[in-house]
């Protein structure tokens, strides 16, 4: 049975912006890819009703995940109302236990939006509690705790404008076209930004971040990560073990 990766973010399109290149490389390395969101993306529109935009964005997210043979899951909570509380932690834990991922990707603990920061905390707990027998959900506990990686923040900066100091860079030059296709599947968001900026800001911004993270790591295009290394979590950099040192650089090779 193939092992699984779970990219679990706040909204549809976050996974594609932040780590689709790496997901594509992991899929090629033999992993099943699951993309999940806590919220349905119901505020991501200037024209549709909630029901319409939820339906549109679900279709887009399924299409994007399908490009790398992956599946899409949504906890169906509401945008801007993602809280660190029982309902979201239990729902996230159910999905983590159903998938039993070896690796989980989620948002940077510091980001521009509270939804992203809450999702980061919720996933930290949903990974940590994977093996806890007395968490009151019917899904069976499993171990070991998954490897947890935080992606870059949106625009690579925290809410005070400080650039995120990464510790791991993945060369996504061979996957940039796939990442672009996956992001372009989110047509409702791309068109919305295009109408506002009069240029294809959605894809341009993604490529500009990938180029900038590439420049600092010696790759053409890169995605950046930090690994959760707190008590109870696995400590090795499994991305390096899977993808190899030609593709993955860590902080001690950069500075
Ligand atoms: Zn988001």
Image: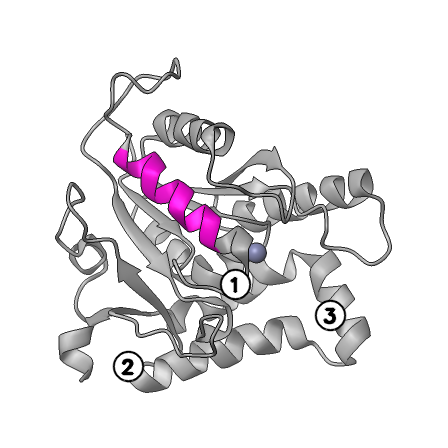
Please tell me which residue is depicted at 15% across the width and 79% down the height of the picture.
Answer: 253
Please tell me which residue is depicted at 82% across the width and 58% down the height of the picture.
Answer: 46
Q: Quadrant of ligand 1?
A: bottom right
Badge 3 local density, few (<14 within 10 Å), some, or many (20+)?
Answer: some
Image coordinates for residue 73, horizontal then vertical, percent:
53, 36
Magenta highlight on residue 132: no
Q: Quadrant of the N terminus?
A: top left
Q: Quadrant of residue 142?
A: top left
In terms of sequence position, does the residue under pointer 2 or pointer 3 come before the other? 3
Image coordinates for residue 166, horizontal then vertical, percent:
30, 71
In this rendering, position of residue 175 left or right of residue 103: right
- Total marks placed: 3
Quickly name the residue at label 2.
217
Circle 3 sits in a helix, a strand or a loop, which is it?
A: helix
Image coordinates for residue 204, horizontal then vertical, percent:
60, 78
In this rendering, position of residue 238 left or right of residue 219: left
**Separation of residues labelled 1 and 2 (CA atoms):** 19 Å
Please tell me whether the stretch drawn in magenta is mainly helix, strand or loop: helix
Q: Among all residues in the image, which is located at the extreme top?
A: 138
Pointer 1 with pointer 2, Cβ within 8 A: no
Within 8 Å of ligand 1, the CB of disc 1? Answer: yes
Quickly name the residue at label 3.
193
Circle 1 sits in a helix, a strand or a loop, which is it?
A: helix
Circle 2 sits in a helix, a strand or a loop, which is it?
A: helix
**Separation of residues labelled 2 and 3 (CA atoms):** 29 Å
Pointer 1 with pointer 3, Cβ within 8 A: no
Magenta highlight on residue 124: yes
In terms of sequence position, does the residue under pointer 1 or pointer 3 come before the other? 1
Mark number, residue 35: none
Badge 2 local density, few (<14 within 10 Å), some, or many (20+)?
Answer: many
Quickly name the residue at label 1.
17
């Amino acid at each position: 049975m193939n092992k699984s990766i779970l990219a679990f973010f706040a909204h549809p399109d976050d996974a594609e912006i932040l780590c689709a290149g790496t997901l594509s490389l992991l899929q090629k390395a033999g992993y099943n890819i699951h993309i999940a969101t806590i919220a349905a993306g119901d505020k991501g529109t200037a024209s549709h009703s909630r029901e319409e935009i939820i339906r549109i964005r679900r279709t887009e997210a399924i299409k994007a995940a399908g490009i790398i043979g992956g599946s899409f899951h949504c906890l169906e909570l509401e945008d801007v109302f993602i809280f660190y509380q029982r309902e979201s932690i239990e729902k996230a834990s159910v999905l983590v236990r159903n998938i039993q991922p070896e690796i989980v990707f989620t948002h940077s603990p510091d980001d521009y939006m509270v939804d992203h920061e809450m999702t980061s905390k919720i996933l930290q707990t949903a990974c940590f509690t994977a093996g806890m027998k007395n968490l009151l959900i019917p899904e069976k506990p499993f171990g070991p705790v998954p490897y947890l990686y935080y992606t870059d923040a949106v625009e690579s900066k925290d809410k005070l404008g400080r650039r995120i100091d990464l510790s791991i860079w993945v060369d996504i030059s061979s996957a940039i076209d796939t990442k672009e296709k996956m992001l372009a599947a989110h047509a409702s968001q791309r068109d919305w930004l295009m109408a506002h900026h009069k240029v294809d800001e959605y894809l341009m911004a993604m490529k500009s971040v990938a180029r900038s993270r590439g420049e600092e790591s010696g790759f053409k295009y890169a995605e950046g990560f930090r690994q959760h290394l707190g008590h109870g979590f696995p400590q090795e950099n499994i991305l390096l073990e899977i993808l190899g040192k030609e593709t993955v650089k860590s902080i001690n090779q950069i500075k």
